[in-house]
Structure formats: C-alpha cells, structure tokens
Image (cartoon, rainbow, N blue to C red):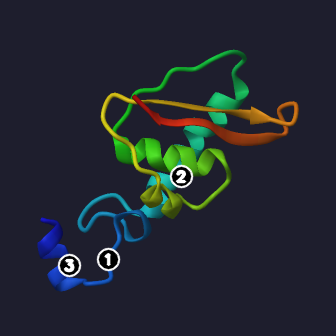
Amino acid sequence: MLAEIHRERPEWELFRDGCPGGESVPRITERVDRVVSRIRALKGNVLIFSSGHVLRILAARWIDAAAALGGRLVLDPACVCVLGYDHGGLDSVIRLWNER
C-alpha cells in the first residue's frame, strides 16, 4: 500500500497529508485535541490505549506541536509512554517515550 501511494504521490507523508480515502489530519487533530482537553480537566493519572499512530499524534498535541510531529515519534508495540507536566504544571511535556 505504501509503495502504491508513493508511486502516485512521491512526497506523501501520513502525518502531514492524512490517509488517502481516510481521515484527514485536521479531522484527527480535532479528535485528539478533544481527548487532550478531557485529560487536562481530570485530576490524577489517566491510562490510554489506542493505535500507535493516534498515540503519536496525541503526544505531539500534548506538547502543543503540530500533528505532523507524530511522524517523528517512533512508537513500538506494547511500550510505555508518560505524558505529564513540568514547572509546576505550566508546561506539558513528554516524560517517558517508547520504554519497553
């Protein structure tokens, strides 16, 4: 599938351009931003399971970066990642990423 897409669109990148015939990057960003907002409103720890691609975008949006940054965050199956805060809760940070 990837080779087919690149034959038609050599410069295509999933995290920038979205999935052909699937969800657009702006749409998934909206969906992930709603999750981030809900998490920020909670007290205590939150555990999230999802597909790796969505989690990569979630991490990017957590630190207020564009969804495209998710394309640069390698995420292996069954690993642990911790998103959190620094500076007394003022800055959203990635505390741990892709830990086995």
Residue 85 location, quadrant: top right
Give the spatial CA distance, label 2 vs label 1. Answer: 21 Å
Q: Are the residues flagged by discs 1 and 3 in contact, CB closer than 8 Å?
A: yes
Instruction: Tell which of 34 and 15 is nearer to you.
Output: 15
Q: Earlier in the sequence, mark 1 or mark 3?
A: 3
Q: Secondary structure at mark 1?
A: loop
Image coordinates of residue 29 in percent, x first then y, are: 51, 54
User: Looking at the image, is mark 3 or mark 2 nearer the viewer?
Assistant: 3
Q: Earlier in the sequence, mark 3 or mark 2?
A: 3
Left or right: where 6 falls relative to 35: left
Give the spatial CA distance, label 1 vs label 3. Answer: 6 Å
Image coordinates of residue 26 in percent, x first then y, are: 49, 62
Can you identify the residue that label 3 sits on?
Answer: 6
Can you identify the residue that label 2 sits on?
Answer: 30
Q: Earlier in the sequence, mark 2 or mark 1?
A: 1
Residue 36 location, quadrant: top right
